[in-house]
């Protein structure tokens, strides 16, 4: 079972509410989301409807979002089910207000919602991790983050949409864009969209001629990208493989259809790599800071435990700092060349000034 994390829920909320991630963080009860996610994770891997029900009930009752909480809760439910290979067969124009009311006032709990979900649940073609790759890659998928696994699942869906009977590097690139996380953000900033990539892919190899079967094998180049993903993650000091590491793997591979598409669409692989590396380092430092705070909190729980309000405020501060520094980072990267020139001129000026005072700047 693939579970959502806090960042996933905030990303869904940002899209639904049409506001930036920073605004979502500042206006959301993060502890309430964490309680709902923790409760959902307590279920066995095969109990997707039950876990989905617990998550949904928690979000509806806790109301972590300042506005449109029910709409966000439904979107999170659909996202969770979709990532685990399921859809909800909801009738067009279905009135769900009564369902929400029953959950909110306690008339419906997780068991009733689980029964409702089962009644409208349809199973997609599930991701076949261990059939798509060889034995060599099996263990590696255990180290993939949920968001990285989602990208692979979405890559499989992209292959099916194009009637391709394999998963190539081009589908991995599309999966990264569809996943909507850090890798997708960097690609968007480079002007790379899913529609543009699909157009280039169809120009290069065209659509498939027959409907693909249930089993979509990974091409040798895709397997090579996955090996490079592991290498890139370790270079950056991460024990978990994330979508941005997959993108770095695609860039490092440099010869597949994905690399051709990026080149044709004008993406600069050197700049992409520089931006991803800088932001990944920032994210790691921020996560380490949050982890350190929570670890310290647990160690002191026997003497004085921080209140949920203080913990919430700290997490908001850390996440907001991450968002703000990311924004600054990308604005600076856009002007990197000009800034470098300015700094060189400033150094030259200061060296000259030192010499006017009979000071040798080189000693």
Image (cartoon, rainbow, N blue to C red):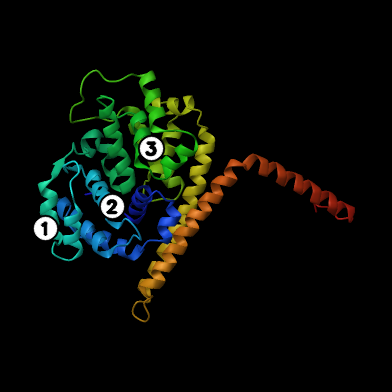
Q: Secondary structure at mark 2?
A: helix
Distance between mark 2 and mark 3 Cα atoms: 24 Å
**What residue would you read off at disc 3?**
177
Q: Secondary structure at mark 3?
A: helix
Distance between mark 2 and mark 1 Cα atoms: 20 Å
- Residue positioned 32% across, 40% down in the render: 151
In terms of image quadrants, where is residue 86? top left
Percent position of residue 34, x then y: 31, 62
> Which quadrant is the C terminus positioned in?
bottom right
Locate residue 182 relative to residue 137 in the image: left or right: right
Is 353 located above or below residue 173 in the figure? below
| Mark closer to the chain start, 2 or 1 | 2
**What residue would you read off at disc 2?**
71
Discs 1/3, front: 1
Percent position of residue 214, x then y: 18, 30
Locate residue 128 relative to residue 181 in the image: left or right: left
């Amino acid at each position: 079972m693939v579970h959502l994390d806090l960042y996933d829920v905030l990303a869904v909320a940002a899209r639904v509410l049409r506001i930036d991630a920073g605004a979502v963080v500042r206006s959301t009860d993060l502890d309430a989301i964490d309680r709902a996610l923790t409760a959902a994770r307590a279920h066995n891997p095969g109990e997707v409807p039950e876990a989905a029900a617990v998550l949904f009930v928690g979000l509806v009752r806790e109301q972590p979002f300042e506005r449109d909480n029910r709409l966000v809760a439904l979107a999170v439910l659909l996202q969770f089910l979709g990532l685990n290979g399921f859809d909800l067969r909801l009738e067009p124009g279905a009135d769900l207000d009564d369902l929400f009311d029953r959950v909110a006032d306690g008339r419906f709990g997780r068991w009733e919602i689980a029964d409702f979900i089962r009644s409208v649940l349809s199973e997609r073609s599930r991701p076949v991790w261990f059939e798509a790759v060889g034995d060599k890659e099996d263990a590696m998928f255990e180290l993939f983050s949920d968001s990285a696994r989602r990208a692979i699942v979405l890559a499989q869906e992209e292959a099916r949409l194009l009637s391709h009977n394999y998963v190539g590097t081009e589908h991995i690139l599309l999966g990264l864009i569809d996943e909507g996380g850090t890798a997708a953000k960097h690609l968007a900033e480079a002007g790379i969209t899913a529609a543009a990539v699909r157009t280039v892919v169809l120009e290069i190899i065209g659509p498939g001629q027959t409907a693909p079967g249930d089993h979509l094998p990974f091409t040798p180049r895709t397997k090579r990208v996955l090996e490079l993903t592991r290498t890139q993650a370790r270079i950056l000091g991460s024990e978990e493989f994330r979508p941005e590491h997959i993108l770095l793997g695609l860039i490092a591979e440099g010869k597949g259809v994905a690399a051709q598409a990026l080149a044709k669409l004008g993406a600069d692989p050197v700049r992409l790599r520089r931006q991803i590396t800088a932001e990944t380092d920032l994210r790691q430092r921020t996560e380490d800071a949050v982890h350190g705070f929570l670890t310290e909190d647990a160690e002191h729980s026997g003497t004085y435990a921080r209140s949920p309000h203080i913990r919430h405020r700290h997490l908001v501060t850390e996440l907001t700092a991450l968002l703000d520094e990311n924004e600054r980072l990308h604005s600076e990267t856009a002007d990197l060349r000009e800034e470098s020139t300015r700094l060189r001129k400033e150094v030259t000026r200061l060296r000259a000034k030192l010499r006017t005072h009979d000071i040798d700047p080189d000693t």
